[in-house]
Amino acid sequence: MPGRPYTITRRSFLDHGKRLNIHRVQRQEPVGQHRHEFFEIVVVLSGTGTHVTGTYRHHLQGGDIFVLNPRRTHGYEDCLSLNIINVLIRDDVLTRIGRSLGDLPGYHALFHLESSRWRQREYTSRLHLSPAELERVEEWVHRMEEEMRRGSRAANLLQEACLAFIIDLLCRHYERQHAPTRRHPVPSTPHRLGHLLSWIEKNLDRPLKIIHLAEQSGMSSRTFYRVFRTALQVTPQAYLARARMQRATEMLTDASHPLSITEIALACGYGDSNYFTRCFHAATGQSPSAYRQQQAATRK
């Protein structure tokens, strides 16, 4: 009988303040199902094996690449000269990159939706790269490793830039792979919700209601509410509130383009600055002005 899934802690691979880490495995051995306290992008360079997640198994070969979030258990079986690269990513790093790539539908599908749907008949997030794409990913990984060894002051920034290139490639590849075709004209649920989350990112300043989101996703309001909550483990209203608050904190932190509290409130979809201030205080325990001053002080 296989043992219960175990957890690999952040301290195991991301200690000493590391934001990212590259873990190469030559001839991966079979390993039981486990989960991580960080995100992981797995790149299969060569060889074969079986990837196990829950009760689902799929064959691995060179060029395969997939994303694992901290909740997803997985393991390996039947490994034959299986050589892989694990790109280990701290949550806050992915959040920063997501601010730039969050308007790509593939980003939400890969990092927020697919990992909750890895049951048989629903697994669709495994990508297979062309030789040229795989070579490009290897080059970016190699550059990240070089920056880690160099340890310069700009190392973290350069590593995150290379990671952003990799994630951008994956998001666009996912979008091409899952776009509706004549043979399969109906988009998958992750594909539709990914497009919706991308649309939300671009329209947070609008007074969005469930009926608007349902129409955008091509579902009835009742079906949309059920599907959304099942896929993201949160209600659409809670997701909107969280997205607006995250956008507001980013804008308050941005010293390069300072806006007034009223301008930030309107840009994030709050009706007026007073309502925004009440919501912000309830979420953070601070007023927007106090939060901005605190962030400014930490940068000095």
Image (cartoon, rainbow, N blue to C red):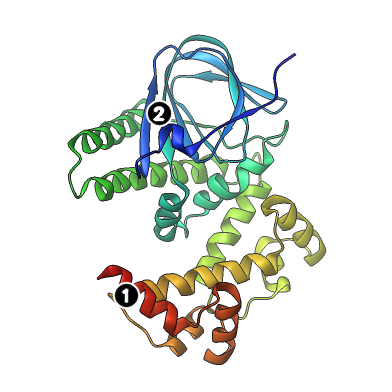
Q: Secondary structure at mark 1?
A: helix
- The residue under label 2 is which amino acid type? Ser
| Mark with earlier residue (2, 1) | 2
Give the residue at x 37% y 84%: 259
Give the residue at x 32% y 47%: 160
Q: Is residue 240 left or right of residue 290?
A: right
Query: In the figure, residue 12 lies in which quadrant?
Result: top left
Q: Position of residue 19 (x, y in %)?
A: 37, 45
Which residue lies under the disc numbered 2?
130
Q: Residues within 10 Å of mark 1 (few under 14, many from 20)?
A: some
Q: Position of residue 104 (x, y in %)?
A: 47, 55
Q: Residues within 10 Å of mark 2 (few under 14, many from 20)?
A: few
Give the residue at x 65% y 39%: 183
Which residue lies under the disc numbered 1?
296
- The residue under label 1 is which amino acid type? Ala
Which of labels 2 and 1 is toward the front?
1
Query: In the figure, residue 70 lies in which quadrant?
Result: top right
Give the vertical position of 108 relative to 133 (above or below). Answer: below
